[in-house]
Amino acid sequence: MSARAAMRRLGGAAILAFLAAGASSGAPPPRITAVEAVAVPAKHATEYQVAPVGSQPGPIDFAWTLRLVRVDTGSRAAVDPGCTNAQLGGGTKEGGLVFTWTNVGDTFLWYHGDCDHRDVGPSGHQGTVTVVVTGRGWQCTGSFAGTDAPVGPPPTCGKPSASSPTKGAPLTPPPGASSSSGGGLSIWIPIVGVLTLVVVAAAWWLLSRPRALLPAAAPTAEVTPVVEAAEPIEGALEAQARDSLPEGWTFGEHNGSNWTATSPDRQVGVFHSTRAGYRWLNATTGEYLT
């Protein structure tokens, strides 16, 4: 390779490196997914989960809060003051019917097997689950109403509130700030550019070598897909729900937590756990059907 060709390739690598460095400085701020809820019949509970999205340097804290409030205001649902999730350890009472856990990470369980199932509504047990996720210079809040809907509303994100002090410098400078006010981020931009230059130049050099010098790719082993067997408990519950469905009711779909049914006059029934086992409940009137 001539010296002129080598310089031309290094110049192209430098341009790519600085373009990559510029792109990294405009990375979107961290955020979280919406809160998702999944029924756990074996534990008579609902599992709530949230996940950070994007790059989050440093530690991340999760604070989950359960508020026992009525969420189905248009039905006969009611708040059960005893549905305090005492089975989940590490919680603290904030006052009234508000309880907080900071020791469970990105997954929260609400145990409601011992709750009064006559108080449930279309959204399940009455209460809201809120999570506050705090990182270095950012904070997001997600929420979920009840125990039955599969996904909560979109979360909100911003800077940490005064009651939740940040554990480090902000990840990105505020909108409209100049590059001189970017703090530690502006220091990393030239470093990223130099490292990218080295990597791109090495890759370019390897690709320019004769193909005979490159090692042959190892044959790819054929992988047989493994199909996991469905959990037998779900099939058994569906069969039990169909067999015990009251006469005249039409079997419906699984709403993420319970099997559902509808009556000829469009009332809604749910098949959920009680102390005596799984039973059909008229969610419209609050009366048990079986």
Image (tube, grey):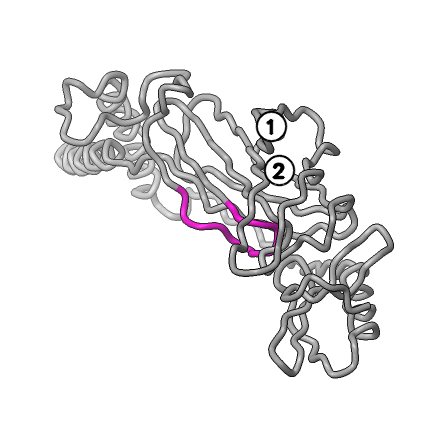
Q: Is residue 138 left or right of residue 286?
A: left
* Residue 71 at x, y percent in the picture: 53, 50
Residue under the image location 35 percent in, 23 percent down: 137
Magenta stretch mostly in which secondary structure? loop
In this rendering, position of residue 175 left or right of residue 121: left
Near mark 1 (Cα within 10 A), the count class, few <14, some 14-19 or many ≥20, is some
- Tell me the amino acid under the disc marked 2: Phe
Earlier along the polypeptide chain: callout 1 or callout 2?
1
- Examine the structure image and report whether residue 148 is included in the region drawn in magenta: yes
* Residue 88 drawn at (x, y percent): 71, 32
Callout 1 touching callout 2 (CB < 8 Å): yes
Q: Secondary structure at mark 2?
A: strand
Magenta residues span 144-155
Distance from label 1 to label 2 (Cα)? 9 Å
The C terminus is located in which quarter?
bottom right
Label ID, residue 108:
2
Residue 67's quadrant in the figure?
A: top right
Figure quadrant of residue 278: bottom right
Q: Which mark is residue 201?
A: none
What crowding class fits label 2: few (fewer than 14 Cα within 10 Å), some (14-19), or many (20 or more)? many
The residue tagged 1 is 101
Q: Secondary structure at mark 1?
A: strand
Rendered view: 153 above or below 290: above
Nearest to the observer: residue 212 or residue 40: 40
Q: Amino acid at mark 1?
A: Trp
For the point 52% across and 55% down, which residue is it? Answer: 73
